[in-house]
Image (tube, rainbow, N blue to C red):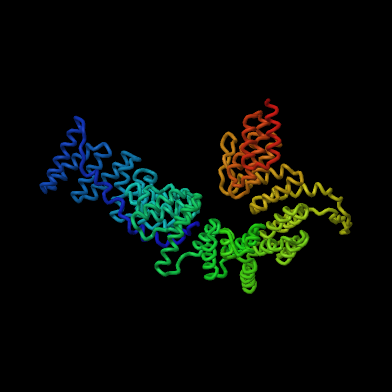
Amino acid sequence: MKKNWNFLSSRLNPVIAALPAVLTVLAAGFLFFSCSGSGKSSSFTAALNTVDSYINLGQTQDALKLLKKTSKSAYSAYARLGIYRRYMTLGEKALAEKTLLSAMKKIPGNSEIHAVYANFLLKENRISEALQTASVLKGTEYGSVYGEILLKSGQNEELFSAERTEIYRDCYAATKNEKWLVNAALQFLKDGNYSEAAVLQQNFDSEFAVFWAAVQFDAKNYDLCLENLENVEKRGDVRFDRGLASDAFYMLGDYDSAEKEREKIILKAEEAKTDDVPENVYLNSAIWSYNAGEYARAYDLLMTVVMRNSKNIPALLTYGKFAGADFEVEEEDLFEQELRKTGLRTYSMQQRDERPKFLISDAVFRIDQVLEWQRENSLPLSDELLVEKLAMWLTENSFLPQKKLESEIWKTLETNEIAENMYPPLLVQFAVSRFLNFGIKEEARLLFEKYLDARYKMKRQEQGENKVEYDIFGGEKRYAAPVVPEFVTRAAFGDRAADYARTMENWEIETAAFFALLDGNVSAARRLYEYVLFETGGAKTVQGDGQIVSFSRLCSVTSAVNLAGIYASEGDLKKALNLYGLSSGRTKSRKLKSKILYLTALVQEDLKNTDGAVLSLEYALSLDPMNAQARLRLKNLKGALK
């Protein structure tokens, strides 16, 4: 849940206006000082002490006369600032300014002198001069001086800019007022640079913990988000956001804690007899309940959303998935069937009987209503709803011959055709996946290739395409170009897709890479897989030594496995092994993990790491005892070791 930070800009001016002035006590430290040493330093200090005595006694003329004389012996920056402060105490602004100007000339680049003079000019309302004097202070310990003058000058009205960010940081360094850091963070949030905004947080137990919790969430620092929220809750702050806490727990994989936060939101609303619970809270709780086997609760929660908002697309999609899952609930075995005839039921039978059912017919009816509403209002039809409706039809009619199922997929595609060979992307993705599952790879390939060419206007030369040759008199001669061999055309598809990868969606890149592999165009497949694995999702994947440390979470594990296979076939065994290891850690499927471990063992064998290969194969069989390839390979390896 990304936060919309734009609304904060309208609240920034009051924040700035409420901040204390940075320079109220900046130069106070220069009013009185002592010097150590002997000779001239001692006499200079003694003279200043006498001036101070005259001032205290009200003998201003004596003080001024001695101060003018003593000023001739002021050489260091601190000595000159001491003279300046005493002139200011005596009300001699002209002499005070003259002292600073002389000091700046004699000791150029001194930050303290520039800061004090800029402050002097600011108090005299000589803003442009103050701004020019303070410009050298940017990035120094007195950078806040420049910041305050710039803010008061009104010359930089842009609330969000790189320059202002530095100003806000400097002001925080001078005042320790956290509002300045909030202002600095807003610039990064506006640009979507959440990580830079997150590192600005200095205090995890501050009055701005609610703000920083949202920042840390968007920066994907979910543990820090929760740390902020815990402090908010401890203080009893009514702004505590349980929805954000639930999302943070979910992103950390702590689904039970996420559900507990949602339960508190729902319970509080029930106790208050209000109906202000966000629909996504009910929806996420429904999904958790269904996965936990709490079907009645899941039904009640999901129906709450559907009845409140019949056009909630995520709720309708969830309804469809539950309906499809309920349709596939295993039938009773012979024992249960015979037992039911006696009027008795086991506990599991009773649970199934009393379990509320999500019906495919009802789900399709509700989805059709929304699709019809979208048509009537000239709105784009939801790809997701079209796919879910088709998926439910295929589930309900899975007993039909495969040709009937293929026909229904084509019918849905043609009904929703946008232009020639152009269909809703998610519908194409679903159709290609089902065709591959049906084993009709060529049909899947042709559908995808034509769709991709139509969507991205890829340059494609048809076989036998007519050409025209013109002569100098304007005549023309038509002839047929030589027929391009089919294997060349097929191989060229992968290269065309690789050229357009940066404009394609991730699933399109992965699918194009898969078909490029089938066509034997390994180089194009490698380019496509490497792009989707290492150049999408902001993944920082490769270390200086070439070791792959991660791959994009926007791509599938299967793509990583395929790329590892390409690396292995090209002899880049360390990369292959590296990628297999990352793929194994990413997947939750025991069967796929077992297959990956088998492939890992093959690479380990090539690297002469027989012991490692044996361990990988044994682990593979522990995950999937039916992995025949792993069993045979392990048997052969152990036989060779004897």
Residue 384 visible to an observer of this rendering = no
Instruction: Depth check: give the residue in front, 11 or 80.
Output: 11
Closest to the observer, 494 or 280: 280
Horizontal side of residue 499 vs 305, given as left or right: right
Lateral position of residue 314 relative to residue 436, left or right: left
User: Which sits in the foreground, 335 or 205?
Assistant: 335
Residue at (22, 38) in percent of width and height: 72
Left or right? Give the position of 454 relative to 100.
right
Q: Quick one: which residue is furthest to the bottom in this view?
A: 376
Where residue 218 sits in the image (x, y, percent)? 48, 53
- Residue 33: x, y in percent? 21, 40
The residue positioned farthest toward the top in the image shown: 642
Instruction: Give the residue at x 38% y 45%.
Output: 136
Examine the image and state in which quarter residue 334 appears: bottom right
Q: In this view, does 380 lie above or below 445?
A: below
Give the quadrant of residue 274. bottom left
Q: Quadrant of the C terminus?
A: top right
